Amino acid sequence: MLGMIIAYPGLSPWYNQGIMETRTSIRLFAADLDGTLLNDQKELPEGMNEALGKLKEKQIAFAACTGRQITNAILALNGISEDYYLIAENGSVITHGEEILHQITMSREDIRRIVSFVHTMPNAACMLSGSKSFYADAWGMSYLNRLSYAKYFLIQEVDDLFSVEDSICKITLCDLDDPIRDAETILKPLREDYEVSPSGDSWIDINVKGVSKRAGIRFLQQKLGIGKSETIVIGDSGNDVPMFSEGYAYAMKNAAPAVQRQADEVTELDNNHAGVLQIIHTLTEEL
């Protein structure tokens, strides 16, 4: 087996195939950042470059998949010396080194509609995720300041979200009530026209319709000529679930039960104990 895991039979078309059948042909390894690759202090696990070096030796491409704004995503990956792909903003931006491979942005009409709608919510504020920075007004900052881990993000405070001069890829809500419930209920009027997905314990991401980590994975697969049977994906949150259908899917040990039930397997170790690296090491040692 590819590490000691908890399995959920019947929940995925991959399950009966088994990892023993697929691992010898793996060509793409895609991992979420927060709650998956990064620990709770937003740090990369020790030995990350060594692990990526082993993937490279086996000709396996590595992709970091995140809902983070692109600059904040790159900052989180600072220290990685090996080559990698980056799927940021839930798939709105895909890069390889300095090259932007794919980018989808929101219209001014989208921004005005979503921000105005969020103003009607009782316990949430929104921020704009742009190509240059992550933007919050005083209303948004008042929410961010309640979160201890917000200090790890690069945030530009602005007077008015509607006046931001940047290409906006995603709108993020800080929801201190119940993001999972609110994404399904309060934000239901937006779901027909946008991708609305809870992320972590305090966030809801809103993207252009059709944008998701799943679509990002599919873009890379098509670009690199890689199939589902040659892909491993791993994540911990609701916005990771769509990409679970694009490869053999791991949910982190620290993921919510609802997320774990959507995966093929669950890691033995959580994000604070380098669960992703355990899978990489076992994969590369047995290839």
Image (cartoon, rainbow, N blue to C red):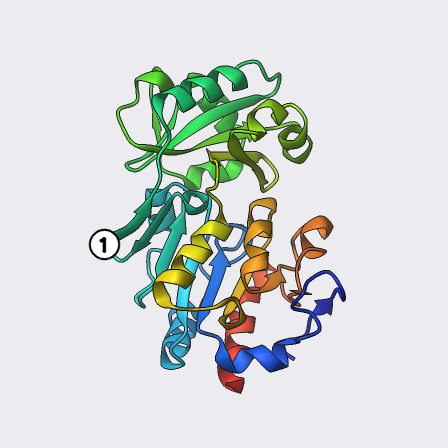
| Number of numbered discs visible in the structure rendering | 1
Q: Is residue 267 visible?
A: yes
In this rendering, the answer to whether 54 lies above or below 212 is below
Residue 224 or 137: which is nearer the viewer? 224
Q: Residue at image x 62%, y 16%?
A: 122
In this rendering, the answer to whether 121 lies above or below 130 is above
Q: Which amino acid type corresponds to the residue marked 1 in the rendered image?
A: Glu
- Quarter of the image holding residue 28? bottom left
Q: Position of residue 238 (x, y in %)?
A: 61, 45
Left or right: 224, with 282 as reference point: left
The residue beneath circle 1 is 98
The residue positioned farthest toward the bottom in the image shown: 286
Q: Secondary structure at mark 1?
A: loop
Q: Residues within 10 Å of mark 1 (few under 14, many from 20)?
A: few
Q: Residue at image x 37%, y 30%?
A: 106
In this rendering, the answer to whether 272 lies above or below 113 is below
Q: Residue at image x 56%, y 45%?
A: 239
Q: Position of residue 275 (x, y in %)?
A: 57, 65
The residue positioned farthest toward the right in the image shown: 9
Q: Position of residue 123 (x, y in %)?
A: 61, 20
In what quadrant of the picture does the N terminus appear?
Answer: bottom right
Q: Residue at image x 36%, y 76%?
A: 56
Left or right: 9, with 218 as reference point: right
In this rendering, the answer to whether 103 lies above or below 274 is above
Q: Is residue 137 visible?
A: no
Q: Position of residue 121 (x, y in %)?
A: 59, 17
The residue positioned farthest toward the left in the image shown: 98
